[in-house]
Image (cartoon, grey):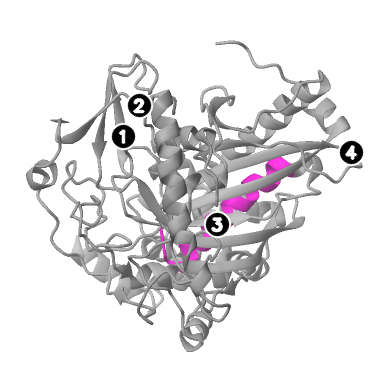
């Protein structure tokens, strides 16, 4: 079993800027452990001759020509934004970065 | 703000050996973004060039821009890199609103180009080989404006505003291997490398690479180690150094700063630093996340890129003469010294002179015009030579026209019709 520690959960939470309470750390450590354990079973059935894959279809080089397609209007683009200002997406104060 | 302790440059170099790594981001001049058909034209109103793909809306699927890949291969080839037979994109996960997807589509352990070099020429003519680790494809981020802070910076800001027009514009990131052995010339090598790379990118026609417009940006990684040791010291990464002069100054400042910290028994913190154009200093940014914190994984929405060898060879055949080779050829053709060539280069006069010679002038007079009267004129007006209201064809005409007061050849039959036609056009 992988054994996800609460420190690892706290670290992941920090990377995702999520505030987790002490008891949530234990709760999610257990859950993440279960998930990773379940996914790890893939390696039990996949033999050495099955390479890891990122895409189920044997496709390569799907590309498009460099031709401009219509964009959304600014109003359409901003229509789902929780807040906007000066035709821009408004986001809360960004902490701890510069 | 506390004053940063610096050791004199000479004292720093007497004790330590600098090791540099340069990361240069080049914004490609494609018509559309890397993974969607939104225009990349500058100057649009905010959020007028976005779509579900570059806004990261659920269900939207990216498709790679063919010219983006072609440009990456051209850059790789011009840097003498190997071109991957097969490579993938990867998601670089980080939590910051400049990327609405919450990840940047980049390449991780499978760059499209790797293991190359670029020979750069220093001002005295010495050639220094800079080894290239990789060149990979990725996308630019949106533009943040911080509101409420006194200086427009994040600190003290109450909120930030995002314009995603730039999000998704193709970037090529070019990473050097550690540059060792440059010694006291390290800052000069850094500047010459970025200058050479800029010329190369322009010669390839894949970007205008204007640093003042953010089309080319440089991060300077620097560490020191005591003379005679092999292990690298802890490095700092000075971000977004955006002029050639600044690249040199940032490297120099960091050498002096690191040396002061190390000499006084301190340790260097692995962090990003901000460069300040006004006084050439750097200040602490954020503690750098480890690569594993970005939780890179292969991008499942994009299929692998496997450039056909025939395509790569075709692109190789189509490469233009490389800038350094071209400069040396022109220097010989024009019969000028290294130093003269350097000042022609610094004046931005190479292309105007070439065009003037092509339009019929001889090399000496083309050079005399552009480096003399016209350079003075441009300098007074604060514009580049190319922005002057005179074309190379004009200069060629002036320099091949003999004036009656000075010469009797003014009436020569070959020149007379041209003089007449230009008069009648007025």
Chain at numbered mark 2? A
Residue at point 43%, 45% (across, down): A32
Quickly name the residue at label 2.
A94
Magenta stretch: includes residue B95: no
The lab-note entry on whether marks 4 and 3 share a chain reads: yes
Residue projecting furthest to the bottom: B310
The lab-note entry on whether marks 4 and 1 share a chain reads: yes
Image vertical order of residue B309 relative to residue B82, above or below: below
The disc label shown at residue B227, or none: 4
Q: Which residues are magenta?
A: B186-208
Q: CA distance from mark 2 to mark 4?
A: 42 Å
Please tell me which of labels 3 and 1 falls first in the chain.
1
Chain at numbered mark 3? B
Quickly name the residue at label 1.
B144
* Callout 3 secondary element: strand
Q: CA distance from mark 4 to mark 1?
A: 43 Å
Image vertical order of residue B21 relative to residue B253, above or below: below
Chain at numbered mark 1? B
* Callout 1 secondary element: strand
């Amino acid at each position: 079993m992988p054994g996800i520690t609460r420190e690892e959960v706290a670290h992941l939470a920090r990377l995702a800027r999520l505030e987790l309470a002490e008891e949530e750390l234990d709760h999610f450590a257990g859950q993440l452990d279960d998930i990773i354990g379940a996914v790890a079973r893939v390696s039990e059935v996949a033999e050495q001759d099955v390479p890891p894959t990122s895409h189920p279809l044997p496709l390569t080089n799907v590309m498009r020509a460099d031709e401009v397609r219509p964009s959304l209007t600014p109003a359409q683009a901003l229509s789902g934004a929780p807040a906007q200002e000066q035709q821009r997406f408004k986001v809360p104060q960004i902490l701890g970065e510069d | 703000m506390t004053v940063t302790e610096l050791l004199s440059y000479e004292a720093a170099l007497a004790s330590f050996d600098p090791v540099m790594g340069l990361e240069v981001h080049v914004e490609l001049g494609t018509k559309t973004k890397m993974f969607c058909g939104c225009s990349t034209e500058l100057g649009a109103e905010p959020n007028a060039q976005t779509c579900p793909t570059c806004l990261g809306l659920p269900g939207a699927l990216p498709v790679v821009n063919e010219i983006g890949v072609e440009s990456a291969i051209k850059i790789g080839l011009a840097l003498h890199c190997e071109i991957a037979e097969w490579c993938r994109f990867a998601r670089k996960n980080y939590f910051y609103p400049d990327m609405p997807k919450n990840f940047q589509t980049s390449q991780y352990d499978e760059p499209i180009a790797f293991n190359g070099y670029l020979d750069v020429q220093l001002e005295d003519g010495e050639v220094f080989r800079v080894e290239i680790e990789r060149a990979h494809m990725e996308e630019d981020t949106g533009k943040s404006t911080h509101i409420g802070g006194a200086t427009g910076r994040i600190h003290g800001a109450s909120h930030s505003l995002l314009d995603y027009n730039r999000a998704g514009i193709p970037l090529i990131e070019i990473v050097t291997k550690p540059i060792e052995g440059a010694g006291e010339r390290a800052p000069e090598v850094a500047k010459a490398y970025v200058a050479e790379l800029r010329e190369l990118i322009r010669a390839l026609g894949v970007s205008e690479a204007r640093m003042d417009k953010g089309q080319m940006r440089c991060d300077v990684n620097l560490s020191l180690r005591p003379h005679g040791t092999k292990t690298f010291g802890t490095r700092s990464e000075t971000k977004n150094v955006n002029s050639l002069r600044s690249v040199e100054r940032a490297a120099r400042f960091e050498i002096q700063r690191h040396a002061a910290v190390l000499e006084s028994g301190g340790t260097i913190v692995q962090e990003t630093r901000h460069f300040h154009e006004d006084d050439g200093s750097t200040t602490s940014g954020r503690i750098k996340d480890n690569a594993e914190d970005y939780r890179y994984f292969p991008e499942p929405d994009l299929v692998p890129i496997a450039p056909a060898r025939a395509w790569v060879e075709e692109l190789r055949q189509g490469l233009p003469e490389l800038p350094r080779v071209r400069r040396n050829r022109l220097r010989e053709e024009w019969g000028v010294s290294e130093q003269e060539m350097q000042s022609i280069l610094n004046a931005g006069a190479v292309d105007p002179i070439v065009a003037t010679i092509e339009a019929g002038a001889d090399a000496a007079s083309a050079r005399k015009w552009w480096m003399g009267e016209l350079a003075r004129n441009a300098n007074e007006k604060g514009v580049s030579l190319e922005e002057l209201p005179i074309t190379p064809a004009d200069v060629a005409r002036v320099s091949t026209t003999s004036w009656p007061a000075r010469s009797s050849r003014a009436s020569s039959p070959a020149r007379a019709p041209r003089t007449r036609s230009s008069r009648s056009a007025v």
